[in-house]
Image (spheres, helix red, strand yellow):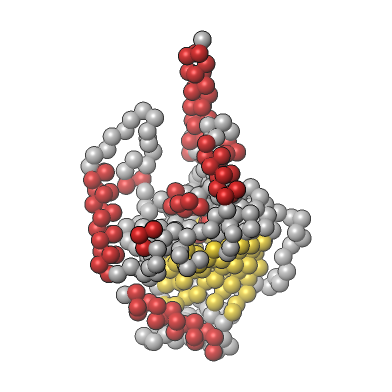
Amino acid sequence: MNTDLLKLTAAAACLASIASGALFAQSDDGWVMGRTPDGQPDLQGVWTNDTITPIERPASLADRDFLTPEEIEAMETGIAQRRTDADNNIVVRAGGNVGGYNQIWLDSGDTVLSTGQTSMIVDPPNGRAPIIESALAERDFYFANVENDYVYHTVWDRCITRGVPGSMLPAGYNNAYRIIQTPDAITIVYEMIHDVRVIPLSKTEHIDPKVRLWMGDSVAHWEGETLVIETTNFNDRGMIANSSAGGRLKGVPASEQLHVVERFTRVSEGTIIWEATMTDPEAFSSPVTISMPLTLENDYQMYEYACHEGNYAIPNILSAGRARERMQASSND
């Protein structure tokens, strides 16, 4: 499975490089790249990426890019059993998890990525993000103060955005993305927080550097069969990743120097390889590249994510902090 997909990816890249002006690209198995009416490679549809593959490579797989079929089976069987055991032994305690306490609330995937890769991060080669110490310290300070002020919560918890590239990273649920194409723009609708990016294909320069945005300013162009999106002009209030699936990257602050280059390459009827390279000297000591397949699921139903309407978590957490302060004050009397 892994070898076939890698061959398919290589074939698609090769064909794109030698025939970028052609009207079609064909893989080894006979699949032909679809085209929009104006001739662009067709990336349209609803795509998903729910997975149990971690964002960073586990230490036990430090020198391994891919899992064996036996390891894949063991991982998928193991997580299925752990989830079943947890669902059959639910205990809700005061002060514990009163939200997603079983799988009925979640849709985080039950398989590894179809490529069989050991982590979403593919560069640096060890599959680990070189997060600088000051960024880790700021992340930890925010986590330690979530009861003190709403500004210390992730911008996802605050129902603002998951940013770029964070909006494409898998989470516990809502892992779907609708791509829509017109002759002069690419639109990506994210199920999580129902964010929408409208990315012009006709624009060649970024906006004034004094203008800073939550999701940055994006400029897109085609390199053969690959859609390349370059994003700059970020504000310094976002985060690299916002959900627990982001592992150590959750809560790492993004600076105004964040620069992201995304690549979308359709390698088969049902697969796009999405790649994002992040450069931010205030977060990482060297660039970080994430790569993963997106799976076509046009029957997937995307619903509105009414985040603010149901967001009782932040006021409840802040009120819990005030209750804790009252308890501590009374104990000191």
In this rendering, is residue 160 above or below 93? below
Residue 161 as seen in the image, left or right of residue 256: left
Disc tally is 0
The residue that appears at 56% across and 79% down in the rendered structure is 40
Q: Residue furthest top?
A: 333
Residue pictured at 58% horizontal, 44% vertical: 138
Q: Can the viewer see residue 48? A: no
Give whichever of 65, 215 is nearer the camera. Answer: 65
Image height check: is 45 above or below 304?
below
User: Where residue 89 sits: x, y (%)?
Assistant: 24, 39
Residue at 67%, 52% in the rendered image: 235
- Residue at 31 percent across and 43 percent down: it is 102
Residue closest to the eye, 152 or 27: 152
Say left or right for 276 vs 237: left
| Residue 267 visible somewhere in the drawing | yes
Q: Position of residue 129 (x, y in %)?
A: 51, 59
x%, y% of residue 20? Answer: 56, 86
Residue 262 against residue 130 in the figure, above or below: below
Q: Which of 67/106 is in front?
A: 67
